[in-house]
Image (cartoon, rainbow, N blue to C red):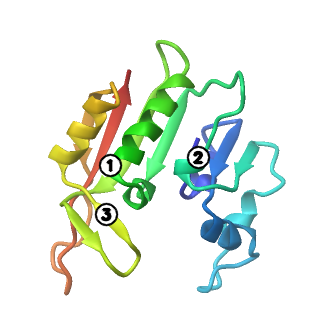
Amino acid sequence: MNSYKPGCLLTIEDRLPTIQDRQGYRRFAAPHSRAGRPSRAHIQGKPSVRNIFNVGLEEWQPLEGVEYDLIWRQWCLGHLTDEQVVQYLELCKTVLRLNSGIIVINTSGIDLFDHTDSSVTRQDETFQSLFKKAGLKVVRTELQRGFPESSPRKLFPVRMYALKP
């Protein structure tokens, strides 16, 4: 399950549900983004797209009886409180395929509140604590490489986590 750029996972997964918050869903349904590039609408109607959940992560409830091999989260956890992150991860645990399911999280890393979009970035130690509270263990973590060294703005480090119950 993915909540960001679902099109990229269509090449490796034959059944892909996606969660889009209300604001994101409006962009998802539009035929083109402001930059003129194809928007998320290019996945609508594809046989690979199993379900589109039009809710925020804090409201998402999995369909009864469903199991996931992979739950992929990019950036969206920054719009949840620490308590909501733990609750969401605990819920994800309940729908992971036994013994083989994995949760992947991609996020950037210092504890900082952004007043512009009301999001929170969290440092590695904070995420480690939230994962532990949710009963998940980190099976692999990696710092993303390839960002420009010289930039007019300082970029936060981006870390990926692979989690299992």
- As drawn, is 43 to the left or to the right of 69? right
Please, is residue 152 above or below residue 50 in the view? below
Kind of residue sitting beneath label 3? Val
The quarter of the picture where the C terminus appears is top left
Badge 3, how many Cα within 10 Å: few under 14, some, many 20+?
many
Which one is in front, 38 or 23? 23
Q: Secondary structure at mark 2?
A: helix
Quadrant in which residue 50 is drawn? top right
Residue at the image point whose x is 32% and y is 49% from the top: 82
The quarter of the picture where the N terminus appears is top right
Residue at the image point whose x is 33% and y is 27% from the top: 136
> Mark 2 to mark 1: distance in Å?
27 Å
| Residue identifier under label 3 | 120
Q: Secondary structure at mark 1?
A: helix
Q: Are marks 3 and 1 in contact (CB under 8 Å)?
A: no
> Mark 3 to mark 1: distance in Å?
9 Å
Which one is in front, 79 or 35? 79
Q: Residue 35's spot in the image, x, y percent?
A: 59, 85
> Mark 3 to mark 2: distance in Å?
25 Å
